[in-house]
Image (cartoon, helix red, strand yellow):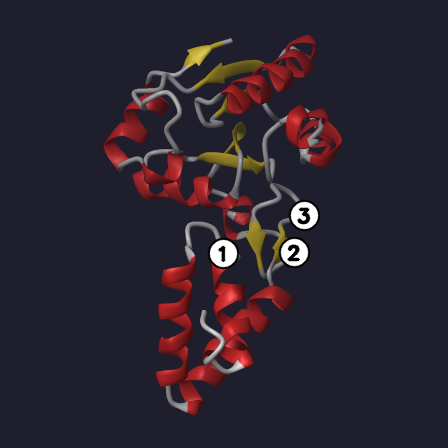
Amino acid sequence: MSDCNALPLVILAEKFARLPGIGMKTAQRLAYYVMSMDDNDAEEFAEAIVNAKKTVHNCKCCQNLTEKEICPICDDQQRDKSVICVVEGPKDVTAFERTKEYNGLYHVLHGLLSPMDGITPEQLKIRELLARISEGNVNEVIMATNPTVEGDATALYIANLLKPLGIKVSRLAFGLPVGGILEYADEVTLYRALENRNYM
């Protein structure tokens, strides 16, 4: 933003620009839009951000985001607790739930293995997944990471950890393009990928 803008406005735009997919021009538009909001709306907007940050945390069981100790999916007694679908992030859980076809549980890794970026197994929620499986109720783990180099490497790494435990490990049969992102896939594509998954 130009030097003629007030410093707080410049800082606000810079904060918006740090969000994924937001360039500086969009960030500036958002900053100007916030300035056009009435005081009550602006305060509610700020309060919603602070409240979400303070109250939302990882589910003790699946690591998905929740405001309770156990998320509603893990707490649902109607779900099939013998199947766990492993995903990269919370957005992927939402994508699968939109299909209304999957009735198992989830496990959120909060990232993918990427040695070049310094992301190692210790930084992902793999230890928590192994702890769940050690309880003995799980028969199958569906690796539903994105079909990228990092997604495939993560799926293979976890599959190699699980196979000696006698767990059936499957991988989604991607009708999705290589390099595609799960959260942008439509419900039919996701459902077909889930139905036609391959065993590893």
**Amino acid type assigned to the residue bearing label 1 in the image:** Leu
State the image coordinates of residue 109 (x, y, percent, origin top left): 60, 35
29 vs 90, left or right, is left
Q: Residue 120 appears at what percent x and percent y?
A: 71, 28
Compute the Cα span from label 1 to label 3: 27 Å
- Callout 2: 10 Å neighbours few (<14), some, many (20+)? some
The disc label shown at residue 69, or none = 2
Q: Earlier in the sequence, mark 1 or mark 3?
A: 1
| In-front residue for pair 92/73 | 92
As measured in the structure, the alpha-carbon distance from the residue carrying label 1 to the one carrying label 2 is 28 Å
Determine which residue is flagged by label 1. Answer: 19
Q: Are marks 3 and 2 in contact (CB under 8 Å)?
A: yes
| C-alpha gap between disc 3 and disc 2 | 6 Å
Q: Which of the pair 86/166 is nearer the observer? A: 86
Q: Secondary structure at mark 1?
A: loop
What kind of residue is marked 3?
A: Lys
Q: Are marks 1 and 2 in contact (CB under 8 Å)?
A: no
Residue sticking out furthest to the left: 188
Q: Quadrant of the N terminus?
A: bottom left
- Residue 79 x, y percent position in the rendering: 47, 38
Instruction: Say which residue appears at 60% left-offset and 24% top-offset.
Output: 138
Q: Amino acid at mark 2?
A: Glu
- Identity of the residue furthest to the front in this view: 3
First of labels 3, 2 by sequence position:
3
Pick the front one: 107 or 148 = 148
Q: Which residue is mark 3?
A: 60
**Residue at the image point whose x is 56% and y is 19% from the top:** 155
Q: Nearer the viewer, mark 1 or mark 2?
A: 1
Answer yes or no: do the residues labelled 1 and 3 have beta carbons within 8 Å?
no
**Residue found at x 33% / y 39%:** 184
**Mark 1 crowdedness (10 Å alpha carbons): few <14, some 14-19, many ≥20:** few
First in sequence: mark 1 or mark 2? 1
